[in-house]
Image (cartoon, coloured by chain):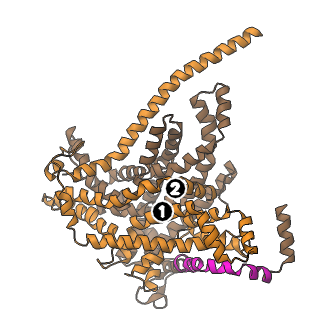
Chain colours: A brown, B orange
Amino acid sequence: MKKKDELIVRRDVSLAKRLYKCWPLYVFLLPGLIWYIMFCYKPMIGLRMAFYDYNIFRGFSGSKFVGLENFKIYMSSPDFGRTLKNTLMIAVWQMVICFPVPVILAILITEMKSKIVSKMVQTISFLPHFISTVVVCGMVVNFLSPSTGIINMILGKFGIEAKYFMVYPQYFRPIYTIMTLWQTAGFNAIVYIAALMGIDPQLYEAAIVDGAGRWRRIINITIPGIIPTVVTMFIMNIGKMVKVGYESILLLYEPSTYATADVISTYSFRMGIQNGDYGVATAAGLFEAVIALILVVAANKVSKRLTETALW
Amino acid sequence: MKKATAIRQNGKNAGIKIQSKSEKIFDAALNVFGVILVAIILYPIYYVFIASISRPLPVENGSVILAPVGVTLESYRQALKTPYLGTALLNSLYYTFGGVLVNMVFSTTMAYALSKKRLVGRKIFTLFTVFTMWFSAGIIPLYMTFRDFHMLNTRSAILFGFAMNTYNMIILKSFFEQVPESLEEAAFIDGASDFRIFSQIYLPLSKPALATVGLFYAVNRWNGYFWPMNLLTDDSKVPLQVLLKKLLVDKVKNEMESAIITSASLSSQTTTIYALIIIAIIPMAIVYPFVQKYFKTGLTIGANKG
């Protein structure tokens, strides 16, 4: 019905008239549009640096166009295999551990009968989200200090020798994952808690009358009830997962842990801002951005087919 | 037939009884789990606090685990002597308050325009913004953009370069879309302009959404270190997080590495570092209880609309 009305209006009123009617809206739109052009789309044009032997002082006109040379340099270097593997590995750790935990946490919180405990868990668990990355990484580095860190001191009480965990590649992923979990689990659970609150309570009442126990209710009502939200969050986050938290990795990694910690974005940052090799740095960044885009589109397609939940 | 119902009845009752017993255990276990979880989450912060008010020696030999030893505020006195700490704190306040103001002006105006069905080209403009969530140019091109605009080492790079976050803008847009159109129509008939409708109908009606989004922006502004670190080179312009990065992460890492190699003792006292961490957390800890209740509304809108 509504659509029909719109069609009639569209036929009757010419474009000029409609534009005249909504012109003040363009005034509202303008500041935002200018910002998007300046700080989102202009950098995209800057991506062509990836195809130049870019010289920061001469600009594009003074730099040589090299085609795919920068990609060749990146992809044939030993850094390529390492950064690609680390990016994927960290993304997998995130997907397997940091993604599902908030869902479980949300179910547990809503299942808690004691209002006080459930409120307390909620309030406390999203507190770490408000502590900055720098402070959290600072805590991790200091806690793991071999001479004065609390972790080594507690391990020392069990007779385990003090170790500076930050310089061993095999500890990087567990450290990073535990840190991320502490920082984000509670906050990410909020969306799921809200979704669980939206489930029709009559469903639970009916299930109780039918004699369904706690587990049955969780498995047959609660979980199906939040699957759409889980899927939406998964698609929204899959692109971010590939970009991984380079801000915290930059603070935590060291040359000695590059083997497991160096990801594409940290490599791109090092090559560009620290070494001044802008062409190769941009090529690596573009490579990452394209993978992220492909993953988002693919996840959306798969989910559309499997669960009929999709972003577009 | 009667028998069967009776059995079923019995079975049902028995079932409920067993259930209620196991359910009690389940509930108790859940509560215990909740309390343990809270303790685990809080412990790192609690430890930093008790270490910061203890004497350095007990902290460094591991006697401080559950309670402070030899309570003193000396570490705080040391921490407050840090050069540029006051400047960095003021800078952070400036970037947070100024930045959030810029964020809100840019986001609310754009969200208002995009929430209106009568906007010609609405779909294209929305796609124009949403596309940047799926594909972004990345670190180096953005850095070069600031360089091209001669914004390196300027405060306005921080304030305006990050004037908008697409996700937050979409939250506002979804909220504005829920405002009944009849309000707007009535105002139009009374001869109100878009500007008046925006400032006198939409903004006052969207207070919860504005609070949530404003808070998200404030947290990002206060906590961000990466771009200020890369864009600002003067110590006098740098916010607190960049200074903290040098003190809490870089310096400690360097000292630990040299300590491993040369077995030299640490020069910066651990307790002073912990005192600095507490100082850095305090502003958020003060605001947190007041704003905490707003999240749920904001996040739910965001999740529903993507």
> Where is residue A71 shown, x and y percent of the image?
48, 73
Is B44 left, or right, of A122 in this rendering?
Answer: left
**Screen quadrant of the N terminus of chain A:** bottom right
Q: Quick check: B254 above or below B32?
A: below
Would you say the magenta stretch is mainly helix, strand or loop?
A: helix
- In the image, what residue occupies the spot 42% across and 53% down? B289
Q: Which residue is mark 2?
A: B294
Q: Is residue B124 magenta?
A: no
Residue lying farthest front?
B190
> Where is residue B159 shown, x and y percent of the image?
44, 76
Report the span colored magenta: A16-42
Contact, CB < 8 Å: mark 1 with mark 2?
Answer: yes
User: Counting other residues with Cα less than 10 Å from the Cα at mark 1, is it few (<14), some (14-19), or many (20 or more)?
Assistant: many
Point out which mark residue B215 bears. Answer: 1
- In the image, what residue occupies the spot 47% across and 77% down? B161
- In the image, what residue occupies the spot 46% across and 68% down? A75
**Screen quadrant of the C terminus of chain A:** bottom right
Along the viewing direction, whichever of B275 and B188 lies nearer the viewer: B188
Label whose residue precedes the other's in the sequence (1 or 2): 1
Mark 2 element type: helix
Along the viewing direction, whichever of A28 and A270 lies nearer the viewer: A28
Mark 1 vs mark 2: tell me if same chain.
yes
Q: Chain of mark 1?
A: B
User: Counting other residues with Cα less than 10 Å from the Cα at mark 2, is it few (<14), some (14-19), or many (20 or more)?
Assistant: some
Q: Is residue A32 magenta?
A: yes
Q: CA distance from mark 1 to mark 2?
A: 9 Å
> Where is residue A56 shown, x and y percent of the image?
41, 85
Is there any visible trace of residue A73 in the rendered image? no
Is there any visible trace of residue A312 in the rendered image? yes
